[in-house]
Amino acid sequence: QKEVEQDPGPLSVPEGAIVSLNCTYSNSAFQYFMWYRQYSRKGPELLMYTYSSGNKEDGRFTAQVDKSSKYISLFIRDSQPSDSATYLCAMKDNQGGKLIFGQGTELSVKP
Amino acid sequence: EADIYQTPRYLVIGTGKKITLECSQTMGHDKMYWYQQDPGMELHLIHYSYGVNSTEKGDLSSESTVSRIRTEHFPLTLESARPSHTSQYLCASRQGSNQPQHFGDGTRLSIL
């Protein structure tokens, strides 16, 4: 069983929709959670970084962490065609452990 | 924001050739990483370094080697390329134990 599970999609939504991207994990030692956005033929770009349960908001993006359920989410409000990309969740423990990635969710926002 | 550069961006080359993928960062980060990424799959760590003259193998077995002679430079070498090495290779760096990693744009390698 993988340590991090992420629905690979693809996910297709109309412009303006609210998008919910999700990851579950099995290792309760994970303390740091990241969301990366990866455009085609580019490297992953850090979107959100959090280390506590609850919500963190940055513009149209909200990262949510529920450590008791081992579940993290990324919400995108008022989605735009420019949000079309693959979104990767990633997490690590606080003992110098390696970063573990989900396999990514491919999102397409249609105008 | 980290500035991290990878060259070449794309490489198509024949079997048996020696290849070096370059990775440089300008932020003075101690920690650097190489990942392999195939379509629809998660990133797999193949090498990492916590500083000059420090290199370690990652979780995914790889026939490549790395060196870290300077803080800013972390090249990856394949002595004899094979079609099974065809993949995207991503370099990343970070500073501090729990800071996020920042990535370059990758090298897309195709071995014929």
Image (cartoon, coloured by chain):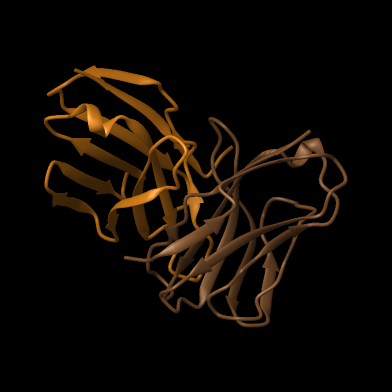
Chain colours: A orange, B brown
> Where is residue A87, by image quadrant?
top left
> Which residue is nearer to you in this view: B12 or B103?
B12
> Where is residue A6, by image quadrant?
top left
Find residue B5 and report its horizontal and vertical position in percent.
49, 60
Location of residue A17 with respect to A100 vertically, above or below: above
Relative to B10, B2 lies left or right: left
> Where is residue B22, by image quadrant?
bottom right
Please identify the quadrant where the N terminus of chain A is shown.
top right
Relative to A53, B12 lies left or right: right
Find residue A11 and report its horizontal and vertical position in percent.
34, 21
> Which residue is nearer to you in this view: B65 or A75?
B65
Q: Residue at x 42, y 28 (%)?
A: A7
Relative to B106, A61 lies left or right: left
Find residue A95 and report its horizontal and vertical position in percent.
49, 71
The answer to whether residue A29 shows anywhere in this view is no
Location of residue A91 with respect to A5 vertically, above or below: below
Find residue A109 and report its horizontal and vertical position in percent.
25, 22
Number of on-image labels: 0
The answer to whether residue B35 shows anywhere in this view is yes
Location of residue A11 with respect to A84 vertically, above or below: above
> Which residue is nearer to you in this view: B76 or A58?
B76
Q: Residue at x 41, y 75 (%)?
A: B27
Q: Residue at x 53, y 49 (%)?
A: B106
Please identify the quadrant where the C terminus of chain A is shown.
top left
Q: Residue at x 52, y 45 (%)?
A: A3
